[in-house]
Image (spheres, helix red, strand yellow):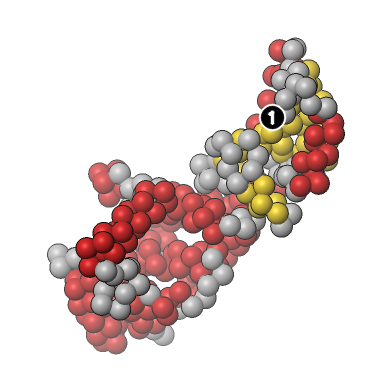
Amino acid sequence: MPELSTHSGGKRVVPDGTVRDEFRLARGWWEAKDTSDRLASEIQKKLKAGYPTRNTIFEDTQRAVLYQDRSEAGEFSLGEPLEIASLLNRFFSHDESDEREFHRAMDEFKSRIPDLAQSLREHIDEAHKKNKRFRDAFAAFMTLCRASLNPELSDGNVDEMLIQHLLTERLMRNLFQNPEFTKRNVIAAQVEGVIEALASSSFSTAEFLKRLDPYYTAIERAGANLSHFTEKQDFLNSVYEQFFQRFSPNVADTQGIVYTPREIVDYMCNAVEQALKEEFGLTLASPEL
C-alpha cells in the first residue's frame, strides 16, 4: 500500500510503502530516499520522526538498510542480485513472536468455528422447544428484525444471527474498547436480551465461550497494536470475512461474502448526506430520520 499513514511511537507517519497481510495488519515498511541524499543521516531523521523499525527497508536505489526488531539488521548493495535476494528474503520472512501467535490463534479459531456453531445450534434448538423465556424473547426479536431489516427473515436466519453474535461480540467490544456498544445499538441490545434468555441450568454462555479465551486474547492483542480507528475497522472486517467463510461456507460461496471496503462505505454515506442536505435540508443525524 503506497503512502499509507500509520501511528508509531505516538506520532503519525507516512512511509512510502506498507506491506499488509490478509488481515490488513502491517508486516513491514519501505522508505525510499534520493540517491543524492546521505542515507545514514536520512534514516536518523526518520527514526527521530517515529518511523516504525519492526521490519523496515530504507534505501536510496544504491544501498538498502534493513531494520528489524527495532535495530539495524543489515546493509545491502542494490547493485548485487544476491544481496537483493537476501534483503527481500529476510524482509518477507520476518516473523515476530506476537505475529506467530496471532496467526496460530486465528487458524485454531477458524478450525473450531464449525463445531462451536453446531453446538450452539443444538442449544438454541433445545431452547426453542423447552425454554419459554427464550421463546418469548426470540419472538420479540423476530418482530424487530422483520420490521427493521427484512420482512422475509426466517427463524433459521435469526438463529444464525444469534450464533454469529455470540462468537464475535467480544472481539467487537474489546477491539474498539467500547463495552457499551450493545446497549446503544437497538438490534445488538435486543440480541443480548435473547442470549440472556438462552441461559439455563444446563447451558452457560460464559462457560461455553471460556474455551475460546486463548484465541480471543491473541486476536485482541494484534488489534490493540492498531492505534487508528480505521485500521481497527479494516482489521475487524478481515477477521469477520475469514470467520464467515468457516461459519457458513455455503452462504459465503454462493453470495461471495466480502465486506464492502471502507472507502466505498464512506462514499455512500457522504452521497446520502449530500442528497439529504440538498433535497430536504436534513442530515443523517436529523431526528426526523
- The answer to whether residue 12 is seen in the rendering is yes
Q: Is residue 124 above or below residue 133?
A: above
Q: Position of residue 124 (x, y in %)?
A: 31, 72
Residue at left 84%, top 31%? Answer: 40
Q: Position of residue 220 (x, y in %)?
A: 59, 60
Residue at left 76%, top 47%? Answer: 49
Q: Residue under circle 1? A: 32
Residue at left 51%, top 69%? Answer: 173
Residue nearest the viewer, comparing 117 with 38: 38
**Relative to residue 204, is residue 93 drawn left or right?**
right
Name the element at disc 1: strand
Q: Position of residue 285 (x, y in %)?
A: 35, 72
Give neighbour class at mark 1: few <14, some 14-19, many 20+ (Cα, 10 Å). Answer: some
Which quarter shows the N terminus? top right
**Relative to residue 54, is residue 258 drawn left or right?**
left
Residue 117 placement: quadrant: bottom left
- The answer to whether residue 94 is seen in the rendering is no
Residue nearest the viewer, comparing 204 with 253: 253
Residue at left 74%, top 54%? Answer: 9
Residue nearest the viewer, comparing 110 with 262: 262
Which quarter shows the C terminus? bottom left
Q: Which residue appears farthest toward the bottom when viewing the image?
A: 133
Residue 76 placement: quadrant: top right
Q: Is residue 37 above or below residue 250?
A: above
What type is the residue that disc 1 sits on? Answer: Ala
Q: Position of residue 191 (x, y in %)?
A: 35, 75
Q: Is residue 17 above or below residue 140?
A: above
Q: Which residue appears farthest toward the top when viewing the image?
A: 80
